[in-house]
Image (cartoon, rainbow, N blue to C red):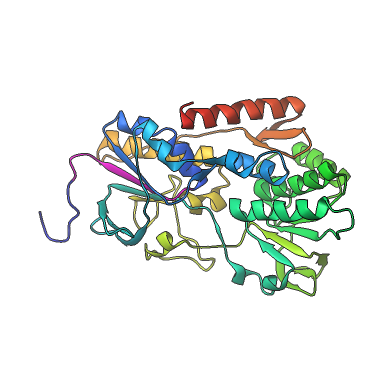
Amino acid sequence: MPQGQPPVADTPHLVLVGNGDTHLHVAANAERFTRCGLNVTLLTRRDFVYADWLGGMLGGEWQRDEICLPAARIAAHGGDHFVAMPTAVDRRMRQLTLDDGRTLTYDWLSIDLPPELDEGSLPGCVSAGDLFGPGVDDLWRLRQQLETRLADASATLPRLAVVGGGPVGVELAANLLALGERYGRPLTVSLIGNDRQPLPGAGRRANRWLMQRLDRRGLQLELVARASRYASGQLILDDGSLVEADWLLITDRSRPSMAERCLALETDEHGEIAVDARLRSHEDPRLILPGQAAAKQALSPRARAAILIDSILQSRERRGEPSSPPRSHPHWRALNLGDLRDIAWRGSWWCRGRWVRRLKHRRDRREVAHYLQY
């Protein structure tokens, strides 16, 4: 073998680094790879979190243990699970050095980890009464602290601000309202988003209905605005307006994970890595970055997983021939609004109501049962 060339493996190998939302759906379909003669290995020290239930957990519907799915269950779908994480990535040799001392060679490497809150991205935020990120640990801590105060009629309730819009911000803000509604003590919640609509991928009628419903429930909605800093119990927005807030839940300010920093890839002025429509790095087409694509392409985890799976299977089948454009994956998206009336949409098509809640629960439970093989 020529010096400096990656080793040739008998069986192509896909390595999934991290317990991100996209990797959960890929792990649940790992048998599609194994049927085609590919090995799949998942590297993570933490279990998966079923993201569609995160909002419901915050709103009091689910318990933490109910939404955490063991990463080791990938074995039921033909994959392998290593309780380890990479400390170094040699992209030329396509080799990982793991923190347990082992090395691992890959043909495709996908990195998808839950976002880590970058406290330095919002000046002054550490001076807030409390600060939370969008991960399961922080959201569970937020719920526990709020429930303690909600259960005590003499306790003062904090003013809450969710910084970061889109479906994630809307669902978390709506479920904060729902938590207060469960206890009969309304919470003061603000949502700051930089888009013109709360759901950028949905139609005008869906957004109008959603804004009216959230307004009736007491949400203060600040659109086309970004938080520039926090001081003295107030968020100062980039248009000069002020939002009163004691506690902050920040969903849109994340820093690169250690695994991503090991890649030594070039980033733009926003710290983002360029990816193509197949979620692959422009610098290295063997490297897949679903998290980078999430922000730029506004794709759901299911859509990102479908693109990842199709892309690798096409590469496997075509064996170096020019690849065809990625297939379209129109998926319905649904949000738990915490009041038994969910909303679902696909482009301009949308629906809402209690029956959407029932269908969403049926789909979610089916997906969880499929992954767990129960």
The part of the image, by quadrant, that contains residue 310 is top left
* Residue 267 sits inside the magenta stretch: no
Q: Looking at the image, is 360 positioned above or below residue 297?
A: above
Q: Is residue 220 visible?
A: no
For this view, does 298 lie left or right of residue 178?
left
Q: Position of residue 28 (x, y in %)?
A: 44, 34
Residue shown at 62% from the left, 54% from the top: 134
In the image shown, does 210 or 10 lie closer to the viewer? 10
Q: Looking at the image, is 76 positioned above or below residue 58?
A: above
Q: Position of residue 215 (x, y in %)?
A: 85, 46
Residue shown at 66% from the left, 55% from the top: 141
Q: Which residues are magenta?
A: 9-19
For this view, does 240 lie left or right of residue 264?
right
In the image shown, does 248 or 197 lie closer to the viewer? 248
Q: Position of residue 194 (x, y in %)?
A: 70, 57
For this view, does 91 lie left or right of residue 194?
left
Q: Position of residue 89 (x, y in %)?
A: 31, 60
